[in-house]
Amino acid sequence: MTMDLRVDPGRLRADIEKLSTFGRDAKGGVSRPSFSRADLEARAWLKDRIRDAGLAVRQDGAGNIFGRIEGPGKTVMAGSHIDTVLNGGDYDGSVGVLAALECLRRIKEESLPLARALEMASFTDEEGNLVGDFLGSRAFMGLLDRDEVTRGRTQFGRSLPEILDGTGLTVESVLAASGERPDLDAFLELHIEQGPILETEEAPIGIVEAISGKKYRWCSFTGKASHAGTTPPELRQDAFLGLADFALRGTRHAAIDHYGSMVTIGKVSVHPGVFSTVPGRAEFSLDIRSVSAETLAALEAEILDIARDIASSRGLKFASRLVDATEPVRVPPRIIGILEDECGKLGYRGMRIASGAGHDAQILAAGCDSGMIFIPCLDGISHSPDESIDWADLEKGANLLLRGLARLAG
Amino acid sequence: MTMDLRVDPGRLRADIEKLSTFGRDAKGGVSRPSFSRADLEARAWLKDRIRDAGLAVRQDGAGNIFGRIEGPGKTVMAGSHIDTVLNGGDYDGSVGVLAALECLRRIKEESLPLARALEMASFTDEEGNLVGDFLGSRAFMGLLDRDEVTRGRTQFGRSLPEILDGTGLTVESVLAASGERPDLDAFLELHIEQGPILETEEAPIGIVEAISGKKYRWCSFTGKASHAGTTPPELRQDAFLGLADFALRGTRHAAIDHYGSMVTIGKVSVHPGVFSTVPGRAEFSLDIRSVSAETLAALEAEILDIARDIASSRGLKFASRLVDATEPVRVPPRIIGILEDECGKLGYRGMRIASGAGHDAQILAAGCDSGMIFIPCLDGISHSPDESIDWADLEKGANLLLRGLARLAG
């Protein structure tokens, strides 16, 4: 490998700035859910950029887009996604797709000898605007359930077949997408951290050693609605106070007994929801994450015990149901080793880090050695128009991705 | 006074059952906001019932309906309201209006000699579906502010002038209603307790000694929204945990240091309100009540201090604004004395009680000696299709109202 192999940071930045014009919204963010008009335009542009780079462009039945350099043996892949949440930012997903494109462009330009095929990938609907997170990468890995794809509505109130109408894709083509998958050797994904740790530690590079699994539960405390002026404290069955008690005790338990695992209550709905009525019902989301499958299971059980204990002492009923779950992933030592080695050679300050957010890399781990490179984002903010990066960090991350791909495919 | 003076319980019950057919809704409750079609029909029926009783019917500029027996000197009045919350019950307000009608009917039938005029009253929009609580009784007492009546929307999305269109009333007539008020001596209101105390104490009669004042504040904790998977506990500024902490500490403080006063958080809104985001903002209602003006002011100040203390220790900002307030009312000893005396003569088990809910009687207190009689309601439930009373309790309450009015006017 040429030791001075580097990306072209200006070209990469220009690509990212161009992509973020597709779906620019009135609030200064990017709204580009998969198969929206903005996304369809961005897809056409991306395919042109892949062709311009001299790569073979391909789209599978799930709408995942690939750019390939042929080589002997299995395929080494890098990528991410170009879809965004509504009113999201310019970098989440995009940097991983366009850095992968830049890496393959540089490898093509340098005519590096390859012992493997190389592909860059852009996966459909990582953000889960349609039927749930990771539609494209799960379709790619054959992990989609037919029921999941056919039932229910998307967040836009239309069914998936309606959303796909006019795209040339169908539910059947989505379900068959994994049949077109090349034999994978490894996958790398560059992504913004979406958290504050690299920035706090002043490290431009995070080498991901594990990706959290999660349990999403929708929960409720049910008590009895009563008049706020006439019901003395000892006769109240205040569902919201049950939730308040649980929020404090549950998060404290996770922080103290399972530091590094996370418990979050992000969505709350209190009924009947008027000034003068003691709440009879409080519904809320519970987001539990851990990089260890054992800890995740134990923490979930302990948290639910705390909720039941609170319900019992406060005269409430507690109920919950699992609405989503992903398994934690450990990044194989081979991938961590290569990335740490190359990071050192490049002279960058890197640190090992866990990913608390879910990523396509986690889905790809079901079929190959999968790893990730994080770069800092300002103030840990993502999924917001305020998403911001230091371009120098992106250059470092892209160079490490390039060196990692060259090692894996070389 | 004839010692066997009693209401006709069958006639009273029939009136209550008839009134509750106006606005009967699909959920088995009553939806009869003032000036709705159901309310206009109920008003026409009520005026007919007043005429049938041989009373002089009158409506003032605020749509308050009166039935009068002339007499010398000032006026002794009894009444309540016939409007309901949406999907309310059969008894809140209605029992007070129709028991007052029954009392005047009996006094008329018995041709009792009167030293005062007697009136029964049905006040407009006690429930505050239009511009705020007690529209009718506040107009009657000259306590309405012009701005309050002309600005803003009602909960039905229409302005008050639009709501009044076709009723023969106008904003100007509402504001002028107090000019038609007779010189008042005393006011009595029979009402369901809307709380569990009489039922718990097995007392059919509550003699109200004070009506709580309240402070309604709309409050917020503001922190920073961040990713639920990537933001460790020590870097979070979780606005919802601030609210949870406040809800527990604030209600505990009220219950322990000011027992009898009430603090309730009934309405909660958490932003951005998704599973995977640590809440950056939590908005909530604060309902503070006390029968003592001094305690109400002290409790409000202490509660706000607790909120600011929590904000400061959790890296949050706290803000709040007053959105409504009513002053506590002490029932004059003369009224309590008469009611306790008559309750004893009737052989009923009565107890003194505070009203935590607001009532028209509280507004009337600005201009005369005002008191209330409570009867139990099942399980303390009100503002619900599940509102329920024991008819034997209602008969006792109405008899006490009758004897109280006879004493005050006799």
Image (cartoon, coloured by chain):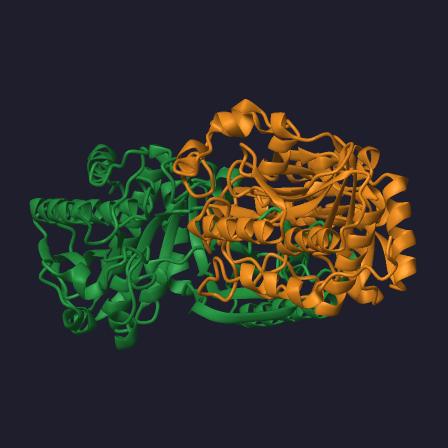
Chain colours: A orange, B green
Q: Residue at x 59, y 37 (%)?
A: A136
Up-down relation of residue B158 to residue A319 (above or below): below
Q: State the residue lying farthest toward the bottom.
A: B146
Number of marks drawn: 0
Instruction: Answer left or right for B161 relative to A67.
Output: left
Q: In which quarter of the image is residue A176?
A: top right
Give B84 or A232, whichever is nearer the viewer: B84
At which x and y percent is residue A304? 71, 35
Give B170 or A340, whichever is nearer the viewer: A340
Q: In which quarter of the image is the C terminus of chain A?
A: top right
Give B330 or A238, whichever is nearer the viewer: A238
Q: Which residue is drawn at 30% across and 43% down?
A: B399
Up-down relation of residue A30 to residue A252 (above or below): below
Instruction: Answer left or right for B54 relative to A60.
Output: left
Instruction: Answer left or right for A24 relative to B406.
Output: right
The reply to whether residue A84 is visible in this rendering is no
At which x and y percent is residue A36? 45, 48
Q: Residue at x 49, y 49 (%)?
A: A44
Q: Which residue is drawn at 80% across and 61% down?
A: A198
The reply to whether residue A138 is visible in this rendering is yes
Q: Quadrant of residue B173?
A: bottom left
At which x and y percent is residue B363? 33, 65
At which x and y percent is residue A12? 66, 62
Instruction: Answer left or right for B286 relative to A193.
Output: left
